[in-house]
Image (spheres, grey):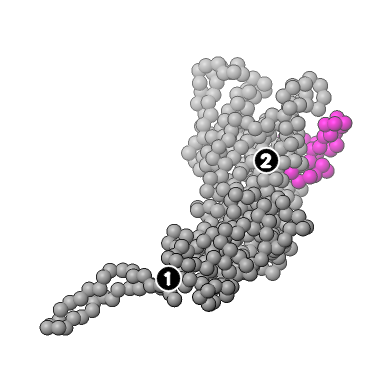
Amino acid sequence: MSKIKALGLPNKIKALGLGNIEVLEAKKIQSEPDNEDFLPIVRINNSEKSKNCIVSVADCASEKINLGIDFDDDLRNYTVPDIVITKNSKAYIPLQNIQGYDGWGYQDGDGILEFRTNNAKAKIRLLSEKNPEKINTNSKTYDLKDAEFGDQYTLEIFHTLNRGDKFSIEIYASDDNDGIWGRSKKTVKCGKLNFTVIQQDVFMVDELKKGFDLLSIISQEHKKRPTTGEYSVNYCIQGADRFLGAIVDNKKDFYAYDDKSQQLIYSPGFTTAIDRAKKIEKLGYGRNYKEFDGGIFGIQEVNKIDKYGNNPSRKLSLKTNGKEAINNYFQTVVKNKIGIHIFYLSIVEAFHTLFIVIDNTNPCDPTYKIYDEDGETSSYGQLKTIGDGLVGQSQWVYTWAKPKFGYWAKLNVSLLKFQRK
Protein backbone atom coordinates (compact mmCIF):
# COMPACT_ATOMS: atom_id res chain seq x y z
CA MET A 1 0.00 0.00 0.00
CA SER A 2 1.29 3.45 -0.86
CA LYS A 3 2.20 5.75 1.97
CA ILE A 4 1.05 9.38 1.89
CA LYS A 5 2.94 12.36 3.26
CA ALA A 6 1.63 15.88 3.66
CA LEU A 7 3.18 18.81 1.86
CA GLY A 8 2.43 22.53 1.90
CA LEU A 9 0.60 24.71 4.47
CA PRO A 10 -2.22 23.61 6.79
CA ASN A 11 -5.79 24.01 5.54
CA LYS A 12 -7.06 27.57 5.82
CA ILE A 13 -10.70 28.07 6.77
CA LYS A 14 -12.93 31.13 6.91
CA ALA A 15 -16.22 31.45 8.75
CA LEU A 16 -19.18 32.24 6.45
CA GLY A 17 -21.87 32.12 9.04
CA LEU A 18 -23.11 29.95 11.88
CA GLY A 19 -21.85 26.45 11.23
CA ASN A 20 -20.62 27.25 7.75
CA ILE A 21 -16.97 27.25 6.59
CA GLU A 22 -15.22 27.75 3.27
CA VAL A 23 -12.02 25.80 2.44
CA LEU A 24 -9.63 28.33 0.87
CA GLU A 25 -6.68 26.04 0.30
CA ALA A 26 -6.60 22.29 0.57
CA LYS A 27 -3.53 20.61 1.95
CA LYS A 28 -1.39 19.25 -0.89
CA ILE A 29 -0.46 15.59 -0.76
CA GLN A 30 2.03 13.56 -2.67
CA SER A 31 2.35 9.80 -2.88
CA GLU A 32 5.64 8.30 -1.83
CA PRO A 33 7.14 5.64 -4.08
CA ASP A 34 5.58 2.22 -3.70
CA ASN A 35 7.43 -0.37 -1.63
CA GLU A 36 8.01 -2.46 -4.74
CA ASP A 37 9.41 0.38 -6.88
CA PHE A 38 13.04 -0.30 -7.83
CA LEU A 39 14.76 3.10 -7.65
CA PRO A 40 18.52 2.88 -8.20
CA ILE A 41 20.76 5.59 -9.63
CA VAL A 42 23.51 4.43 -11.98
CA ARG A 43 26.71 6.42 -11.57
CA ILE A 44 30.39 6.26 -12.45
CA ASN A 45 32.28 4.08 -9.97
CA ASN A 46 35.14 6.40 -9.09
CA SER A 47 36.89 3.74 -7.01
CA GLU A 48 37.92 2.01 -10.25
CA LYS A 49 39.83 3.31 -13.27
CA SER A 50 38.23 3.45 -16.72
CA LYS A 51 40.03 2.02 -19.74
CA ASN A 52 40.43 3.47 -23.25
CA CYS A 53 38.31 6.46 -22.37
CA ILE A 54 38.25 9.72 -20.45
CA VAL A 55 35.38 10.29 -18.02
CA SER A 56 34.47 13.82 -17.03
CA VAL A 57 31.67 14.90 -14.71
CA ALA A 58 32.11 18.67 -14.93
CA ASP A 59 29.56 20.99 -13.36
CA CYS A 60 30.61 23.77 -15.73
CA ALA A 61 30.06 21.85 -18.94
CA SER A 62 28.10 18.61 -18.49
CA GLU A 63 24.40 18.13 -19.18
CA LYS A 64 22.14 18.06 -16.12
CA ILE A 65 18.84 16.21 -15.83
CA ASN A 66 16.22 15.83 -13.10
CA LEU A 67 15.38 12.20 -12.41
CA GLY A 68 12.00 13.13 -10.93
CA ILE A 69 10.07 13.15 -7.68
CA ASP A 70 10.46 9.41 -7.07
CA PHE A 71 14.05 10.01 -6.00
CA ASP A 72 15.32 11.71 -2.85
CA ASP A 73 15.64 15.49 -3.10
CA ASP A 74 19.44 15.45 -2.81
CA LEU A 75 19.83 12.78 -5.49
CA ARG A 76 17.35 13.65 -8.22
CA ASN A 77 19.56 16.32 -9.87
CA TYR A 78 21.88 14.20 -11.99
CA THR A 79 25.01 15.45 -13.77
CA VAL A 80 25.46 13.41 -16.94
CA PRO A 81 29.05 12.15 -17.38
CA ASP A 82 30.80 13.14 -20.60
CA ILE A 83 32.86 10.20 -21.79
CA VAL A 84 35.43 10.38 -24.59
CA ILE A 85 36.21 6.96 -26.07
CA THR A 86 38.94 5.74 -28.39
CA LYS A 87 38.36 5.23 -32.10
CA ASN A 88 39.71 1.72 -32.58
CA SER A 89 39.60 -0.01 -29.18
CA LYS A 90 36.87 -1.17 -26.86
CA ALA A 91 36.19 1.23 -24.00
CA TYR A 92 35.40 0.16 -20.45
CA ILE A 93 33.57 2.34 -17.93
CA PRO A 94 33.14 1.25 -14.28
CA LEU A 95 29.61 1.79 -12.95
CA GLN A 96 27.72 1.31 -9.71
CA ASN A 97 24.11 1.28 -8.51
CA ILE A 98 23.27 3.45 -5.52
CA GLN A 99 19.95 3.63 -3.70
CA GLY A 100 17.95 6.52 -5.10
CA TYR A 101 15.16 6.62 -2.51
CA ASP A 102 15.40 5.97 1.20
CA GLY A 103 11.83 5.79 2.43
CA TRP A 104 10.15 4.47 5.53
CA GLY A 105 10.10 0.72 6.03
CA TYR A 106 10.58 -1.91 3.34
CA GLN A 107 11.88 -0.83 -0.07
CA ASP A 108 12.59 -3.17 -2.99
CA GLY A 109 16.36 -3.40 -3.38
CA ASP A 110 16.60 -5.25 -6.68
CA GLY A 111 15.07 -5.19 -10.11
CA ILE A 112 15.74 -4.82 -13.82
CA LEU A 113 18.06 -2.36 -15.57
CA GLU A 114 17.90 -1.44 -19.24
CA PHE A 115 20.62 0.42 -21.15
CA ARG A 116 19.29 2.13 -24.30
CA THR A 117 21.75 3.54 -26.84
CA ASN A 118 20.56 6.03 -29.45
CA ASN A 119 23.03 4.86 -32.09
CA ALA A 120 23.01 1.37 -33.56
CA LYS A 121 26.71 1.65 -34.43
CA ALA A 122 27.54 1.60 -30.71
CA LYS A 123 27.35 -1.91 -29.25
CA ILE A 124 27.39 -2.47 -25.49
CA ARG A 125 27.89 -5.25 -22.97
CA LEU A 126 27.63 -5.18 -19.19
CA LEU A 127 30.25 -7.24 -17.38
CA SER A 128 30.17 -8.34 -13.75
CA GLU A 129 33.88 -7.52 -13.22
CA LYS A 130 34.09 -4.13 -11.49
CA ASN A 131 37.72 -3.45 -12.44
CA PRO A 132 38.13 -2.77 -16.19
CA GLU A 133 41.81 -3.69 -16.01
CA LYS A 134 40.89 -7.25 -15.01
CA ILE A 135 38.43 -7.90 -17.80
CA ASN A 136 39.34 -10.76 -20.14
CA THR A 137 37.66 -13.26 -22.45
CA ASN A 138 36.41 -15.23 -19.43
CA SER A 139 34.68 -12.30 -17.76
CA LYS A 140 31.02 -12.97 -17.03
CA THR A 141 28.15 -10.76 -18.11
CA TYR A 142 26.31 -8.68 -15.53
CA ASP A 143 22.71 -9.84 -15.06
CA LEU A 144 20.60 -6.78 -15.85
CA LYS A 145 17.48 -8.66 -14.78
CA ASP A 146 18.84 -9.14 -11.27
CA ALA A 147 20.38 -5.73 -10.52
CA GLU A 148 20.76 -4.64 -6.90
CA PHE A 149 21.72 -1.59 -4.89
CA GLY A 150 25.48 -1.61 -4.33
CA ASP A 151 26.33 -3.57 -7.48
CA GLN A 152 29.59 -2.60 -9.16
CA TYR A 153 30.16 -3.62 -12.77
CA THR A 154 31.64 -2.47 -16.08
CA LEU A 155 30.13 -1.13 -19.29
CA GLU A 156 31.95 -2.28 -22.43
CA ILE A 157 31.53 -0.30 -25.65
CA PHE A 158 32.51 -1.31 -29.17
CA HIS A 159 31.61 0.95 -32.08
CA THR A 160 32.07 1.67 -35.78
CA LEU A 161 31.65 5.44 -35.50
CA ASN A 162 33.84 8.21 -36.88
CA ARG A 163 35.99 10.63 -34.92
CA GLY A 164 33.91 13.32 -33.29
CA ASP A 165 30.65 11.36 -33.51
CA LYS A 166 28.42 11.55 -30.45
CA PHE A 167 25.83 9.26 -28.92
CA SER A 168 24.22 8.66 -25.55
CA ILE A 169 22.96 5.83 -23.39
CA GLU A 170 19.90 6.26 -21.19
CA ILE A 171 19.41 3.87 -18.29
CA TYR A 172 16.02 2.74 -16.97
CA ALA A 173 14.97 0.69 -13.95
CA SER A 174 11.85 -1.38 -13.27
CA ASP A 175 10.61 -4.00 -10.83
CA ASP A 176 11.37 -7.69 -11.31
CA ASN A 177 8.20 -9.05 -9.62
CA ASP A 178 9.95 -10.83 -6.76
CA GLY A 179 8.62 -8.72 -3.90
CA ILE A 180 6.11 -9.57 -1.20
CA TRP A 181 3.66 -6.80 -2.17
CA GLY A 182 3.22 -7.68 -5.84
CA ARG A 183 4.79 -6.09 -8.88
CA SER A 184 5.35 -2.39 -9.47
CA LYS A 185 4.52 -1.24 -12.99
CA LYS A 186 6.74 1.83 -12.73
CA THR A 187 9.72 2.34 -15.04
CA VAL A 188 12.04 5.23 -14.20
CA LYS A 189 15.04 6.83 -15.85
CA CYS A 190 17.91 6.31 -13.42
CA GLY A 191 20.96 7.52 -15.34
CA LYS A 192 22.44 8.73 -18.59
CA LEU A 193 25.88 8.72 -20.23
CA ASN A 194 27.03 10.99 -23.08
CA PHE A 195 29.79 9.80 -25.41
CA THR A 196 32.11 11.33 -27.98
CA VAL A 197 34.56 9.43 -30.17
CA ILE A 198 37.83 11.25 -29.63
CA GLN A 199 38.37 13.95 -32.23
CA GLN A 200 41.17 14.13 -34.78
CA ASP A 201 43.00 16.88 -32.88
CA VAL A 202 42.51 15.54 -29.34
CA PHE A 203 44.53 12.77 -27.70
CA MET A 204 44.04 10.29 -24.89
CA VAL A 205 46.38 10.53 -21.92
CA ASP A 206 47.96 7.15 -22.74
CA GLU A 207 48.77 8.24 -26.30
CA LEU A 208 51.37 10.68 -25.00
CA LYS A 209 53.44 7.99 -23.31
CA LYS A 210 55.60 7.22 -26.37
CA GLY A 211 56.30 10.91 -26.84
CA PHE A 212 57.30 11.54 -23.24
CA ASP A 213 59.38 8.36 -23.06
CA LEU A 214 61.34 9.62 -26.06
CA LEU A 215 61.56 13.15 -24.66
CA SER A 216 63.11 11.70 -21.51
CA ILE A 217 65.93 10.20 -23.61
CA ILE A 218 66.37 13.38 -25.62
CA SER A 219 66.55 15.60 -22.54
CA GLN A 220 69.03 13.35 -20.77
CA GLU A 221 71.34 13.29 -23.77
CA HIS A 222 71.03 16.99 -24.56
CA LYS A 223 71.66 18.07 -20.97
CA LYS A 224 75.09 16.44 -21.19
CA ARG A 225 75.97 19.22 -23.64
CA PRO A 226 78.19 17.04 -25.87
CA THR A 227 80.52 18.80 -28.29
CA THR A 228 80.08 16.25 -31.08
CA GLY A 229 77.36 14.00 -32.38
CA GLU A 230 73.58 14.17 -32.61
CA TYR A 231 72.99 16.25 -29.50
CA SER A 232 75.83 18.73 -29.92
CA VAL A 233 73.58 21.24 -31.70
CA ASN A 234 70.68 23.40 -30.53
CA TYR A 235 68.23 20.54 -30.56
CA CYS A 236 64.89 22.27 -30.01
CA ILE A 237 63.39 21.81 -33.48
CA GLN A 238 64.59 18.21 -33.72
CA GLY A 239 63.30 17.43 -30.24
CA ALA A 240 59.83 18.83 -30.93
CA ASP A 241 59.64 16.98 -34.24
CA ARG A 242 60.65 13.69 -32.67
CA PHE A 243 58.05 14.11 -29.91
CA LEU A 244 55.24 14.71 -32.42
CA GLY A 245 56.39 11.84 -34.62
CA ALA A 246 56.36 9.47 -31.66
CA ILE A 247 52.77 10.46 -30.77
CA VAL A 248 51.50 9.47 -34.22
CA ASP A 249 54.10 6.71 -34.73
CA ASN A 250 55.51 8.31 -37.88
CA LYS A 251 59.21 8.22 -38.75
CA LYS A 252 58.70 9.05 -42.42
CA ASP A 253 57.40 12.60 -42.09
CA PHE A 254 58.99 13.59 -38.77
CA TYR A 255 62.61 13.78 -37.75
CA ALA A 256 63.71 10.36 -36.49
CA TYR A 257 66.92 9.14 -34.90
CA ASP A 258 67.83 5.72 -33.47
CA ASP A 259 69.60 6.30 -30.17
CA LYS A 260 70.75 2.69 -29.89
CA SER A 261 72.50 2.49 -33.24
CA GLN A 262 73.17 6.25 -33.26
CA GLN A 263 71.87 6.45 -36.82
CA LEU A 264 69.72 9.11 -38.41
CA ILE A 265 66.52 7.61 -39.80
CA TYR A 266 64.90 10.66 -41.38
CA SER A 267 65.34 14.41 -41.51
CA PRO A 268 62.83 16.75 -43.17
CA GLY A 269 65.54 19.35 -43.81
CA PHE A 270 64.75 22.11 -41.33
CA THR A 271 64.88 25.82 -42.16
CA THR A 272 62.84 27.59 -39.45
CA ALA A 273 60.17 26.43 -37.04
CA ILE A 274 57.65 28.67 -38.79
CA ASP A 275 58.34 26.92 -42.08
CA ARG A 276 58.22 23.58 -40.33
CA ALA A 277 54.82 24.37 -38.77
CA LYS A 278 53.40 25.21 -42.18
CA LYS A 279 54.85 21.99 -43.59
CA ILE A 280 53.33 19.91 -40.77
CA GLU A 281 49.97 21.53 -41.50
CA LYS A 282 50.34 20.81 -45.22
CA LEU A 283 51.12 17.16 -44.42
CA GLY A 284 47.76 16.95 -42.64
CA TYR A 285 49.10 16.84 -39.09
CA GLY A 286 48.10 20.34 -38.05
CA ARG A 287 45.35 22.96 -38.08
CA ASN A 288 44.58 26.43 -36.73
CA TYR A 289 47.99 27.90 -37.54
CA LYS A 290 48.32 31.39 -36.04
CA GLU A 291 51.06 33.99 -35.89
CA PHE A 292 51.09 36.78 -33.30
CA ASP A 293 53.43 39.68 -34.04
CA GLY A 294 55.46 41.67 -31.54
CA GLY A 295 52.60 44.09 -31.01
CA ILE A 296 51.19 41.84 -28.30
CA PHE A 297 54.26 42.48 -26.12
CA GLY A 298 55.20 45.42 -23.97
CA ILE A 299 58.95 46.21 -23.71
CA GLN A 300 60.58 48.02 -20.81
CA GLU A 301 64.26 48.98 -20.90
CA VAL A 302 66.06 48.08 -17.67
CA ASN A 303 69.35 49.78 -16.80
CA LYS A 304 71.17 46.79 -15.41
CA ILE A 305 73.18 43.89 -16.74
CA ASP A 306 71.33 40.61 -17.23
CA LYS A 307 72.62 37.03 -17.13
CA TYR A 308 73.46 37.15 -20.83
CA GLY A 309 75.56 40.32 -20.52
CA ASN A 310 73.03 42.79 -21.95
CA ASN A 311 73.30 46.25 -20.41
CA PRO A 312 70.78 47.78 -20.54
CA SER A 313 68.49 44.78 -20.63
CA ARG A 314 64.83 44.58 -21.57
CA LYS A 315 61.85 43.25 -19.68
CA LEU A 316 58.88 41.82 -21.54
CA SER A 317 55.21 41.81 -20.62
CA LEU A 318 52.00 40.98 -22.40
CA LYS A 319 49.74 43.87 -23.28
CA THR A 320 46.07 43.61 -22.34
CA ASN A 321 45.01 43.15 -25.96
CA GLY A 322 47.81 40.61 -26.38
CA LYS A 323 46.60 38.57 -23.42
CA GLU A 324 43.06 38.67 -24.75
CA ALA A 325 44.20 37.58 -28.21
CA ILE A 326 46.20 34.64 -26.81
CA ASN A 327 43.37 33.50 -24.53
CA ASN A 328 40.80 33.84 -27.30
CA TYR A 329 42.92 31.68 -29.59
CA PHE A 330 43.17 28.82 -27.10
CA GLN A 331 39.53 29.08 -25.99
CA THR A 332 38.40 28.95 -29.61
CA VAL A 333 40.60 26.00 -30.55
CA VAL A 334 40.38 23.90 -27.38
CA LYS A 335 36.73 24.67 -26.59
CA ASN A 336 35.15 22.03 -24.34
CA LYS A 337 36.77 19.14 -26.20
CA ILE A 338 37.75 16.76 -23.42
CA GLY A 339 41.23 15.25 -23.63
CA ILE A 340 44.82 16.28 -24.32
CA HIS A 341 45.66 19.03 -26.82
CA ILE A 342 49.13 19.59 -28.32
CA PHE A 343 50.46 22.78 -29.91
CA TYR A 344 53.67 23.28 -31.87
CA LEU A 345 55.21 26.58 -30.73
CA SER A 346 57.98 28.88 -31.94
CA ILE A 347 59.00 32.22 -30.42
CA VAL A 348 61.34 35.18 -31.02
CA GLU A 349 62.03 35.00 -34.77
CA ALA A 350 61.69 31.23 -34.48
CA PHE A 351 64.98 31.07 -32.57
CA HIS A 352 63.39 28.57 -30.21
CA THR A 353 60.97 25.70 -30.87
CA LEU A 354 58.82 24.22 -28.14
CA PHE A 355 55.50 22.45 -27.73
CA ILE A 356 52.55 22.95 -25.41
CA VAL A 357 50.50 20.17 -23.82
CA ILE A 358 47.07 21.23 -22.58
CA ASP A 359 45.23 18.91 -20.21
CA ASN A 360 41.51 19.45 -20.78
CA THR A 361 40.32 16.26 -19.11
CA ASN A 362 38.59 18.60 -16.65
CA PRO A 363 37.12 21.37 -18.83
CA CYS A 364 36.28 23.38 -15.70
CA ASP A 365 40.00 23.78 -14.95
CA PRO A 366 42.23 23.13 -17.99
CA THR A 367 45.99 23.34 -17.43
CA TYR A 368 49.05 23.70 -19.65
CA LYS A 369 52.76 22.83 -19.66
CA ILE A 370 55.41 24.04 -22.10
CA TYR A 371 58.23 21.68 -23.11
CA ASP A 372 61.44 21.94 -25.11
CA GLU A 373 64.38 19.62 -25.80
CA ASP A 374 65.37 19.69 -22.12
CA GLY A 375 61.93 18.56 -20.98
CA GLU A 376 59.37 20.49 -18.97
CA THR A 377 60.10 24.20 -18.74
CA SER A 378 59.29 26.62 -15.93
CA SER A 379 56.09 27.64 -17.74
CA TYR A 380 52.98 25.79 -16.59
CA GLY A 381 49.70 26.41 -14.79
CA GLN A 382 46.04 27.09 -15.48
CA LEU A 383 45.27 27.61 -19.14
CA LYS A 384 43.95 31.10 -18.49
CA THR A 385 47.52 32.08 -17.47
CA ILE A 386 49.21 30.69 -20.59
CA GLY A 387 50.10 34.23 -21.69
CA ASP A 388 52.45 34.43 -18.70
CA GLY A 389 54.10 31.21 -19.85
CA LEU A 390 54.67 32.57 -23.34
CA VAL A 391 56.19 35.74 -21.88
CA GLY A 392 58.46 33.70 -19.61
CA GLN A 393 59.86 31.64 -22.47
CA SER A 394 60.12 34.63 -24.82
CA GLN A 395 61.97 36.63 -22.15
CA TRP A 396 64.99 34.37 -21.85
CA VAL A 397 65.22 33.67 -25.59
CA TYR A 398 64.98 37.40 -26.35
CA THR A 399 67.81 38.35 -23.99
CA TRP A 400 69.88 35.28 -24.93
CA ALA A 401 69.66 36.10 -28.64
CA LYS A 402 70.85 39.71 -28.33
CA PRO A 403 74.58 39.03 -27.69
CA LYS A 404 74.51 35.92 -29.89
CA PHE A 405 73.17 37.67 -33.00
CA GLY A 406 74.04 41.27 -32.19
CA TYR A 407 70.55 42.78 -32.30
CA TRP A 408 67.23 42.70 -30.46
CA ALA A 409 65.30 40.00 -32.27
CA LYS A 410 61.82 40.29 -33.63
CA LEU A 411 59.23 39.29 -31.05
CA ASN A 412 56.64 36.93 -32.45
CA VAL A 413 54.75 33.80 -31.46
CA SER A 414 53.54 31.13 -33.88
CA LEU A 415 51.20 28.29 -32.92
CA LEU A 416 49.96 25.19 -34.71
CA LYS A 417 47.39 22.77 -33.33
CA PHE A 418 48.74 19.23 -33.76
CA GLN A 419 46.43 16.44 -34.92
CA ARG A 420 46.31 12.96 -36.33
CA LYS A 421 46.23 12.69 -40.09
Q: Earlier in the sequence, mark 2 or mark 1?
A: 1
Residue 375: within the magenta? Answer: no
Quadrant position of the N terminus in the picture: bottom left
The disc at residue 32 is 1
SS of the residue under disc 2: strand
- What amino acid is found at the position of numbered circle 2 in the picture? Tyr
Q: As drawn, which residue projects farthest toward the left? A: 18
Q: Is residue 94 left or right of residue 181?
A: right
Q: As drawn, which residue projects farthest toward the front? A: 180
The disc at residue 344 is 2
- In this figure, what is the number of numbered marks? 2
Q: Is residue 158 left or right of residue 106?
A: right
- What amino acid is found at the position of numbered circle 1 in the picture? Glu
- The answer to whether residue 420 is visible is yes
**Secondary structure mainly formed by the magenta segment:** loop
The answer to which image quadrant residue 350 occupies is top right
Tell me, yes or no, whether the two marked residues, 2 and 1, touch with CB atoms within 8 Å: no
Question: Mark 2 and mark 1: span between their CA atoms?
Answer: 59 Å
Looking at the rendering, the stretch of residues picked out in magenta corresponds to 247-272
Tell me which residue sits at (58%, 35%) in the image.
Answer: 380
The answer to which image quadrant residue 408 occupies is top right
Q: Is residue 312 left or right of residue 407?
A: left
Q: Position of residue 292 (x, y in %)?
A: 59, 40
Tell me which residue sits at (78%, 20%) in the image.
Answer: 227
SS of the residue under disc 1: loop
Q: Position of residue 39 (x, y in %)?
A: 52, 66
Q: Position of residue 277 (x, y in %)?
A: 71, 42
